[in-house]
């Protein structure tokens, strides 16, 4: 914290800014960084403030003539970390390191550097622009890029290039995520803490001890380098990808960075290509659902839709269906945003709106590629919907997803987008609505006799038993381990098509959908077989 009175005394004595200047902000004493306030208001320039801070801290000012002629290794400190925090190594011996900093009050960066090199650090101050020019000369962009990617050719988890604390902590976080089957790793900077959380079975949990707060900037920089993101950009969201190897397993990372009031928030989506569903049998659902899905896929043309909220497993179901029909005699093209798994023998295209590569204009081009099956990751607008319908009506099998709560809601959603009921009736072969419910932990689940109201609600006999969550180390005391898919599968037969044409919707179908054509969510079976709890089912389907 800088004492504003002492700072003003130095400014006054050097005639840079008088205490009685009417331009001085009234709340200068209320901030911990009055130097930055003065700079932002244009009352003192950068070079002058550099000299003032040097006098305030009783440190020397590093002149550009004193900068080294070639880059100094600085105990193996990461080049990107040094540049991002404007820390220029000036000289180094066995016991100490002399550096020039633009902001000597940056204790976080200083502590991280000291921890990394385990030496005494002597600090000088230098003008920010002088430091930037020195980094441009000494630390080329390609060197920084290589520093982050050189380890990816290894056959094991060896992500560290400098073997520093951030690398070690990142290794530990990734290993914890992999060992606990986490789908996402969250790294969040708060005012006084650095929080790490893992999404396991759809729920965020904290495991182990959080990394120390002073490592925050260094750890975030390390992750951004791995994802080939701009480490110096902290004001804008960024997205990146990377491939790493953990104990011989390839893991694909999707990295998202957004700025927050306390720093950057990172989310890493972990994708194991080995876990990509090989066919419908790999879906964690019952055999009746698989039989119905295969019956839908027997159609050589038409549209099949998957529905459900975000995180309900729609993409997994889409990949399973593609693998089911991925034959040598079958050409499949997918349009995805993003591509989560790479499928052998399938032409996958990444949507890129930043260059005008949208679902709609891609779909037009794909139709000229003579495909048998087209997968559109998501129908988001009326243009994409119309093109997908057109493709389905002209001899192609189109598989896609919609954000609706139920299978019946997909028809309503298409009508709301402006698609005529007669086109829906002609094109749509079936709709899959799905949810993921947490599976009771096999090690600690308890069972109890069902109550009469529960038996009546879920069509169970009064002597039935149902499962309840317990809590053990295997499930991190949650009572659940893994997830299963519950599905409702709607097949549009002739009876239902006629109803749609006559009434213009399916909101009040009045029995037009019967059991052979409509399979509701497998709620009763999941409860009866002690796969999940009534509380979990209620939590997932309480909106219906």
Image (tube, rainbow, N blue to C red):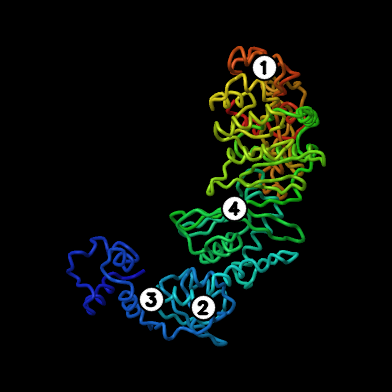
Q: How far apart are marks 2 and 3 (CA)?
A: 16 Å
**What secondary structure is found at the residue carrying circle 4?**
strand
Q: Position of residue 470 (x, y in %)?
A: 70, 41
Which of marks 1 and 4 precedes in the sequence?
A: 4
Q: Name the residue under label 1.
A: 497
Kindly indicate the quadrant of the structure image that contains residue 421: top right
Kindly indicate the quadrant of the structure image that contains residue 248: bottom right
Q: Distance between the residues labelled 4 and 3?
A: 39 Å
Q: Do the residues labelled 1 and 2 touch (CB within 8 Å)?
A: no
Q: Mark 4 points at which residue?
A: 197
Q: Where is residue 542 in the image (x, y as percent from the top left)?
A: 59, 29
Q: Residues within 10 Å of mark 3 (few under 14, many from 20)?
A: many
**What secondary structure is found at the residue carrying circle 3?**
loop
Q: Mark 3 points at which residue?
A: 127
Q: Nearer the viewer, mark 4 or mark 2?
A: 2
Q: Distance between the residues labelled 1 and 2?
A: 70 Å
Q: Position of residue 530 (x, y in %)?
A: 75, 33
Residue that sits furthest to the right in the current view:
328
In the rendered view of the protein, which quadrant contains the N terminus? Answer: bottom left
Front one among 469 and 54: 54
Q: Distance between the residues labelled 1 and 3?
A: 74 Å
Q: How far apart are marks 4 and 2 (CA)?
A: 38 Å
Which of marks 3 and 2 precedes in the sequence?
A: 3
Q: Which of marks 1 and 3 is in front?
A: 1
Q: How crowded is mark 4: few (under 14 residues within 10 Å), some or many (20 or more)?
A: many
Q: Do the residues labelled 1 and 3 touch (CB within 8 Å)?
A: no
Q: Distance between the residues labelled 4 and 1?
A: 47 Å
* Image-based side of 394 in relation to 384, left or right: right
Front one among 147 and 303: 303
| As drawn, 207 above or below 142 | above
Q: How crowded is mark 1: few (under 14 residues within 10 Å), some or many (20 or more)?
A: many
């Amino acid at each position: 914290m800088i004492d504003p009175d002492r700072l003003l005394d130095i400014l006054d004595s050097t005639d840079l800014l008088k205490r009685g200047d009417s331009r001085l902000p009234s709340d200068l004493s209320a901030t911990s960084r009055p130097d930055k306030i003065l700079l932002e208001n244009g009352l003192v320039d950068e070079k002058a403030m550099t000299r003032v801070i040097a006098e305030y801290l009783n440190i020397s000012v590093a002149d550009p003539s004193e900068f080294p002629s070639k880059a100094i290794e600085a105990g193996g400190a990461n080049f990107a970390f040094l540049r991002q925090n404007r820390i220029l190594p000036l000289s180094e011996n066995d016991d100490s390191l002399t550096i020039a900093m633009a902001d000597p009050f940056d204790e976080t960066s200083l502590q991280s550097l000291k921890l990394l090199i385990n030496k005494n650090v002597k600090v000088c101050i230098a003008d920010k622009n002088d430091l930037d020019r020195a980094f441009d000369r000494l630390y080329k962009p390609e060197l920084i890029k290589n520093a982050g990617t050189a380890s990816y050719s290894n056959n094991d988890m060896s992500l560290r290039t400098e073997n520093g604390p951030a690398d070690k902590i990142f290794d530990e976080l990734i290993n914890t995520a992999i060992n606990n089957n986490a789908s996402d790793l969250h790294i969040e900077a708060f005012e006084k803490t650095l929080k790490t959380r893992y999404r396991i079975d759809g729920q965020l949990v904290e495991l182990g001890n959080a990394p120390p707060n002073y490592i925050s900037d260094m750890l975030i920089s390390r992750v951004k380098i791995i994802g080939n993101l701009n480490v110096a950009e902290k004001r804008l969201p960024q997205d990146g990808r990377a491939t790493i190897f953990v104990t011989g397993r390839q893991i694909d990372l999707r990295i998202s960075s957004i700025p927050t009031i306390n720093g950057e928030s990172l989310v890493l989506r972990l994708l194991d290509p080995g876990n990509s569903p090989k066919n419908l049998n790999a879906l964690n659902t019952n055999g009746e659902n698989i039989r119905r899905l295969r019956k839908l896929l027997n159609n050589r043309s038409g549209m099949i839709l998957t529905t459900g909220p975000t995180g309900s497993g729609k993409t997994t179901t889409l990949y399973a269906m593609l693998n089911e029909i991925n034959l040598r005699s079958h050409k499949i093209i997918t349009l995805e945003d993003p591509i989560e798994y790479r499928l052998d023998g399938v032409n996958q295209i990444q949507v890129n709106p930043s260059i005008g590569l949208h679902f709609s204009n891609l779909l037009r081009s794909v139709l000229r590629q003579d495909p048998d099956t087209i997968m559109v990751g998501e129908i988001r607008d009326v243009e994409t919907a119309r093109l997908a319908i057109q493709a389905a009506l002209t001899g192609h099998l189109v598989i896609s997803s919609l954000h609706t709560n139920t299978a019946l809601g997909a028809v309503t959603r298409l009508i709301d987008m402006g698609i005529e009921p007669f086109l829906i009736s002609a094109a749509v072969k079936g709709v899959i609505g799905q949810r993921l419910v947490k599976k009771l932990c096999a090690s600690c689940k308890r069972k109890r006799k069902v109550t009469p109201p529960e038996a009546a609600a879920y069509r169970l006999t009064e002597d039935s038993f149902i499962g309840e969550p317990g809590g053990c180390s295997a499930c991190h005391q949650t009572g659940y381990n893994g997830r299963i898919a519950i599905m409702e599968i709607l097949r549009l037969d002739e009876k239902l098509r006629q109803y749609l044409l006559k009434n213009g919707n399916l909101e009040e179908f009045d029995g037009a959908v019967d059991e052979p054509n409509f399979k509701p969510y497998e709620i009763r079976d999941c409860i009866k077989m002690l796969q999940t709890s009534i509380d979990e089912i209620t939590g997932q389907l309480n909106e219906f």
